[in-house]
Amino acid sequence: MKLLEGKVAIITGAAQGNGYGIAKVMAEKGAVTIMTDKSDKVKETAAEITAITGNDKVYAYVMDVTDKAAVNEVVRNAEETHGRIDILVNNAGISLLTEIEKMDEELRDLHFNININGPWNCVKAVLPGMMERRYGRIVTISSVTGPRVCDPENIAYATTKSALLGFSKAIAIDTAGYNITSNAILPGYFLTPMVELTAWETDADNPQRVLDEIVETIPAGRFGKPEEIGYLAAFLASDEAAYITGSEFVIDGGSTLPETISVGR
């Protein structure tokens, strides 16, 4: 029997990047995999994952996590169709660089609305069913940026990703008695469209230089693969992790280990 056989999982921001990797692994592990994204591309991605994994229970919904009504409708539809939701992976998010002196309320609110209010909407939608059935697994994708480290011009992103740790822990303590777990994953650098955008924002003339220099600072010597976050998320979503809740898991190839980039080299 596969690790997530018979479980029903919703993954947000699943059209590409880490969300794609998470959805792919969930499908490989046997879950009914419900992929959501504000981009219509999620339908194409779901078809691709079905073809790759052979799991014919992969579904796609165009859904904006900031739209509470849309989130509620997708959750209601999923529960009616599949009987329940066992797993929620809060992955949807954005990261836009800005010089701190140019930070404005519009950019702040954009990050807060997607990166914080989005997971809030999704958790609020799935929790009643999970609590009634006394079973659930919630995995929230935070970041090493904010909670552990921070590069320049990341004030909005770092703030929201730090907030998600408190959010995840609060869910954990309030739902532990219902056999619901809530844990956070803190990725480092994975080669995703978000990271490629960050490289372009840093040096529009030569974004590859930025990517190459990032890799030079990672002890593992490479970017992470989105599926590697998927394997961690699948474990945390499984019954094998039933006694793990309120915890944080860094997955960064050792990028936050060095105290300096020069000593001993």
Image (cartoon, helix red, strand yellow):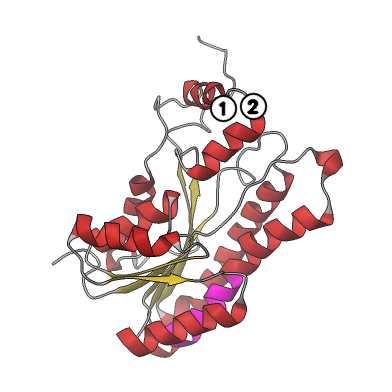
**Is residue 149 rendered to the left or right of residue 99?**
left
Which label sits on residue 240? none
In the displayed structure, 132 sits above or below 249; it is below
Residue 235 visible in the snapshot = no
Classed neighbour count for the residue bearing mark 2: other residues with Cα under 10 Å, few (<14), some (14–19), many (≥20): few
Residue 196 in the magenta stretch? The answer is no
Which residue position is annotated with label 1? 207
Q: Helix or strand or loop: what does disc 2 sit on?
A: loop
Classify residue 102 by image quadrant: top right
x 43%, y 83%: residue: 130
Choose between 7 and 184: the one closer to the eye: 7
Q: Amino acid under label 1? A: Pro
In the displayed structure, 126 sits above or below 258; it is below
x 40%, y 24%: residue: 221
Q: Return the x and y of residue 124 as percentages of the image width and height.
A: 56, 79
Circles 1 and 2: CB atoms closer than 8 Å: yes
Q: Return the x and y of residue 133 as percentages of the image width and height.
A: 38, 88
Q: Which residues are magenta?
A: 120-130
Q: How many numbered marks, from 0 up?
A: 2
Q: Return the x and y of residue 211 as percentages of the image width and height.
A: 51, 27
Taking the view exactly as shown, the residue that stands out farthest to the right is: 101
Which label sits on residue 203? 2
**Is residue 135 rendered to the left or right of residue 37?**
left
